[in-house]
């Protein structure tokens, strides 16, 4: 048999919904066409994947790429380069740019900027505000939209919706799952004095666990009243895990690599680089989030890649902005956790491809199946590597993991059948496209 495939991945250990085993995968025109033992296959290119694991392409459903308006921190090109260098094949990008993505025009502008200029595929979250309530149901269904994002607590940008009446009005307009930054703004305002000048370790004293829990409880109550489905971003407390466990019928949630890896002790060495909203907290919360991941309360991993320049981060706390890079380190940091026995590779795949597909309704991504987009993250589970600032493609140019040795490394990133990254080298001109949601 001599079907001329465009590309065949040969001899890798494929991790998919079918299990884990040696398989070859063939693709034509950017789609998967055959899965099995394809010894006689002829193809324009055959990639020897022996010794490597072939995973469905990793989807990072929370990144901030800062374009338009804040390109000194990042842009769609540099952010997506960081994504593919780290093995990420698709991203959902956040609306807190300048201008914010809150209208059909600003969404179309982002899609125009991204198409053919981003290195990975993409969708854009649209900010829900008091002003655009009446257009929410049209906006969330526009091509290229991931859905609606709500900021119930203030963070970078000015998309705050802090009162129940407005949150309810927005939720009532939605049919898609709404992604929420959940911290209780009234409580944050009351506690501003708890910030100690020059001491980022006071960040979790100010934005405490009660602020996160209270907001998440309000949100679930409002979502039930509205009949809406919600997605709680970057869970940071053990208490929210315990609470959300009883609300899985309407609520999904995300964990970030930094909340699973860092804890309050790291403010000593990282200082403002560890300053993030919601904050990095005491180790008991990190354990609680791991418990939630292991009991499958957590649905997806998102990096919350939120780059700021080094000089911005060097301002004395609390003038320093919150956020850290993460899209390029999501895969290696989490594979290191896999190697340490904290989750299985199958669960990693569930969190980074099957999970996003299930909860956001991706029509042709997130699964190794014939007819699906040929997106793959190819990893060497034995490769050890010391993460450094200078290999970060993000314009920010730093990572909180500088100097950390990890085992498990992304070797290749394949997007719609094209090898975009192999062994740290960019192999293709940018050709990112908007993701289709069902
Ligand atoms: O720390 C954060 N920074 N958390 C967010 O949710 C937003 C982000 C940013 O955009 O800088």
Image (cartoon, rainbow, N blue to C red):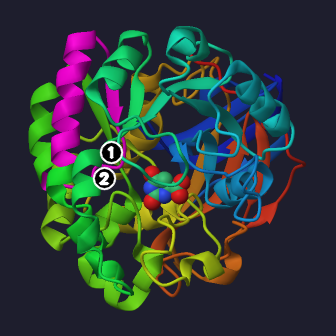
Q: Is residue 376 left or right of residue 213?
A: right
Q: Is mark 2 within 8 Å of ligand 1?
A: no
Q: Is residue 116 above or below residue 220?
A: below
Which residue lies under the disc numbered 2? 344
* Picture residue at 35% right of the left edge, 39% below the top: 152
Residue 305 is at least partly visible in this image: no
Q: Which residue position holds label 1?
A: 347
Quadrant occupied by the N terminus: top right
Residue 404, can we see it? yes
Q: Is residue 170 magenta?
A: no
Neighbour class for label 2 at 10 Å: few (<14), some, many (≥20)?
some
Q: CA distance from mark 2 to mark 1?
A: 5 Å
- Residue 130 on image: x %, y %: 47, 24
Left or right of 63: which side holds 180?
left
Q: Position of residue 266 (x, y in %)?
A: 32, 82
Could you tell me which residue is drawn at 33 percent across and 45 percent down? 347
Direction from residue 228 to residue 210 in the image, left or right: left
* Image position, residue 269 (x, y; %): 38, 90
Relative to 375, does residue 77 appear above or below in the rendering?
Answer: below
Quadrant of residue 101 in the image?
Answer: top right
State if disc 1 and disc 2 touch (CB < 8 Å).
yes
Residue span colored magenta: 212-238
Confirm or reject: label 1 Cβ below 8 Å from ligand 1.
no
For label 2, the SS is loop
């Amino acid at each position: 048999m001599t079907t001329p495939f465009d590309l065949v991945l040969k001899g890798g250990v494929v991790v998919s919904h079918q299990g884990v085993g040696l398989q070859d995968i063939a693709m034509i025109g950017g789609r998967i066409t055959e899965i099995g033992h394809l010894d006689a296959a002829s193809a324009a290119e055959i990639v020897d994947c022996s010794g490597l694991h072939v995973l469905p392409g990793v989807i990072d459903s929370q990144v901030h790429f800062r374009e338009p308006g804040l390109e000194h921190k990042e842009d769609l090109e540099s952010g997506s380069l960081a994504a593919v260098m780290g093995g990420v094949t698709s991203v959902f990008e956040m609306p807190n740019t300048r201008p914010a993505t809150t209208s059909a025009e600003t969404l179309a502008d982002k899609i125009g900027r991204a198409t053919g200029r981003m290195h990975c595929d993409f969708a854009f979250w649209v900010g829900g505000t008091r002003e655009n309530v009446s257009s929410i149901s049209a906006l969330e269904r526009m091509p290229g939209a991931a859905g609606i994002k709500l900021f119930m607590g203030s963070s970078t940008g000015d998309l705050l919706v802090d009162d129940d009446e407005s949150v309810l009005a927005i939720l009532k307009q939605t049919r898609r799952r709404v992604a929420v930054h959940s911290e209780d703004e009234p409580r944050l305002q009351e506690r501003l004095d708890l910030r100690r000048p020059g001491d980022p370790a006071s960040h979790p004293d100010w934005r405490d666990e009660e602020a996160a829990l209270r907001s998440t409880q309000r949100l679930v109550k409002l979502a039930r009243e509205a009949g809406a489905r919600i997605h709680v971003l970057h869970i940071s407390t053990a208490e929210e895990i315990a609470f959300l466990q009883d609300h899985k019928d309407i609520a999904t949630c995300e964990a970030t690599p930094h909340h699973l890896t860092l804890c309050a002790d790291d403010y000593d060495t990282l200082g403002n680089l560890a300053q993030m909203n919601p904050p990095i907290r005491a180790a008991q919360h990190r354990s609680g989030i791991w418990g939630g991941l292991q009991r499958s309360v957590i649905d997806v991993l998102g990096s919350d890649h939120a780059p700021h320049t080094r000089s911005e981060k060097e301002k004395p706390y609390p003038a320093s902005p919150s956020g850290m890079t993460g899209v390029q380190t999501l895969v290696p940091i989490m594979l290191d956790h896999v190697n340490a026995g904290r989750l299985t590779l199958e669960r990693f795949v569930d969190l980074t491809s099957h999970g996003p597909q299930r909860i956001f309704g991706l029509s042709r991504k997130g699964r190794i199946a014939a007819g699906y987009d040929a997106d793959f993250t190819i990893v060497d589970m034995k490769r050890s590597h010391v993460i450094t600032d200078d290999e970060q493609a993000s314009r920010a140019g730093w990572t909180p993991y500088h100097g950390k040795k990890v085992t498990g490394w992304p070797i290749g990133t394949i997007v719609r059948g094209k090898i975009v990254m192999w062994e740290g080298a960019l192999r293709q001109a940018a050709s990112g496209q908007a993701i289709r949601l069902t």
